[in-house]
Image (cartoon, rainbow, N blue to C red):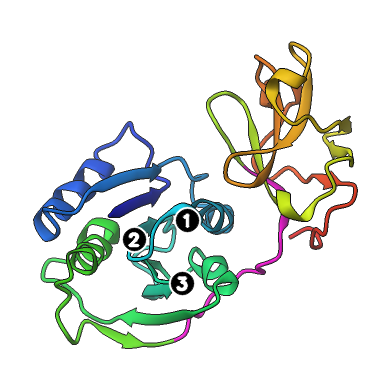
């Protein structure tokens, strides 16, 4: 399967253009829209989100990962194989946390360039053809050269808000398996209690819990925690009993 992970959003034609290329290079491979709302231009948040989201997918899955504000500049284009899954994208740190947390990881630089490569849409022109060929098992020899990732983010948990969904729930970069559920979470001058589920909180009550991908999330029962607490991507959080790293 091919999974798309981008900051493209849905309002523009970019996702459709990716799928058109993938339909040519891997016509029999299912294409899944994993996330197209990675915070714009934010490869660091994207790296944390990708590491949390990828774990449930099978060996052999191919992730086309595009958060690429440096497109057309000197950043490299890379392929990562980590614990049997494949990742294709820019070498701007986006793939680095997956690589750092993997038990086994290999990386290559994409030195192939197609005819007519545009300066501003490498997602369509460069990354999508490579991802499609990997997924279809038809990658020609000579397209890749073994090389390390050049840009690497700290793989420790990130005590900041990474993503806010359309309900107003705020995902953080703290992994739930490393925190004490009896601790209180501090954000924007507020201190929040843990609840196991939404139904354990009062209507309109803000709280924190461990969400379905294993990250600490700030939520409110039948309300928007982001609106209630004035939350934004990048806001720092602090959780008693967590093994969080320094603020990044």
Q: Residue at x 79, y 62 (%)?
A: 245
Q: Position of residue 94 (x, y in %)?
A: 50, 63
Residue 119 falls in image quadrant: bottom left
Q: Determine the CA span between mark 2 and mark 3.
A: 10 Å
Residue 48 falls in image quadrant: bottom right
> On the picture, is 2 further left or further right than 215?
left
Query: Circles 2 and 1: CB distance less than 8 Å?
Result: yes
* SS of the residue under disc 2: loop
Numbered circle sitting on residue 83: 3
Q: Residue at x 19, y 75 (%)?
A: 113
Q: Residue at x 56, y 53 (%)?
A: 52
Magenta span has 156? yes
Q: Residues within 10 Å of mark 1 (few under 14, many from 20)?
A: some
Sequence-earlier tag: 2 or 3: 2
> On the picture, is 162 further left or further right than 183?
left
The C terminus lies in which quarter of the figure? bottom right
Numbered circle sitting on residue 61: 2
Tell me the magenta residue range.
Answer: 148-162
Q: Determine the CA span between mark 2 and mark 1.
A: 9 Å
Q: Determine the CA span between mark 1 and mark 3.
A: 11 Å
The N terminus lies in which quarter of the figure? bottom left
Numbered circle sitting on residue 54: 1
Sequence-earlier tag: 2 or 1: 1
Magenta span has 235? no
* SS of the residue under disc 3: loop
């Amino acid at each position: 399967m091919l999974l798309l992970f981008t900051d493209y959003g849905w309002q523009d034609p970019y996702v459709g253009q990716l799928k058109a290329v993938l339909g040519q290079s891997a016509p029999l491979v299912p294409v899944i829209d994993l996330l197209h709302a990675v915070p714009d231009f934010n490869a660091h948040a994207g790296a944390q989100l990708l590491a949390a989201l990828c774990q449930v997918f099978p060996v052999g899955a191919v992730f086309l990962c595009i958060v690429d504000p440096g497109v057309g500049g000197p950043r490299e284009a890379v392929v990562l194989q980590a614990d049997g899954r494949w990742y294709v994208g820019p070498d701007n740190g986006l793939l680095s946390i997956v690589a750092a947390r993997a038990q086994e990881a290999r990386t290559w630089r994409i030195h192939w360039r197609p005819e007519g490569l545009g300066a501003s849409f490498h997602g369509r022109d460069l990354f999508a053809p490579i991802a499609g060929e990997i997924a279809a098992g038809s990658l020609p020899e000579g397209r890749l050269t073994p090389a390390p990732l050049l840009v690497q983010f700290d793989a420790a948990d990130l005590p900041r808000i990474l993503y806010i969904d359309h309900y107003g729930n705020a995902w953080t970069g703290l992994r739930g398996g490393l925190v004490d559920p009896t601790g209180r979470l501090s954000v924007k001058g507020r201190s929040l209690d843990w609840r196991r589920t939404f139904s354990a909180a009062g209507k309109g009550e803000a709280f924190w819990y461990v969400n379905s991908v294993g990250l600490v999330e700030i939520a409110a029962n039948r309300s928007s925690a982001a609106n209630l607490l004035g939350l934004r991507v990048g806001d720092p959080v602090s959780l008693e009993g967590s093994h969080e790293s320094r603020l990044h």
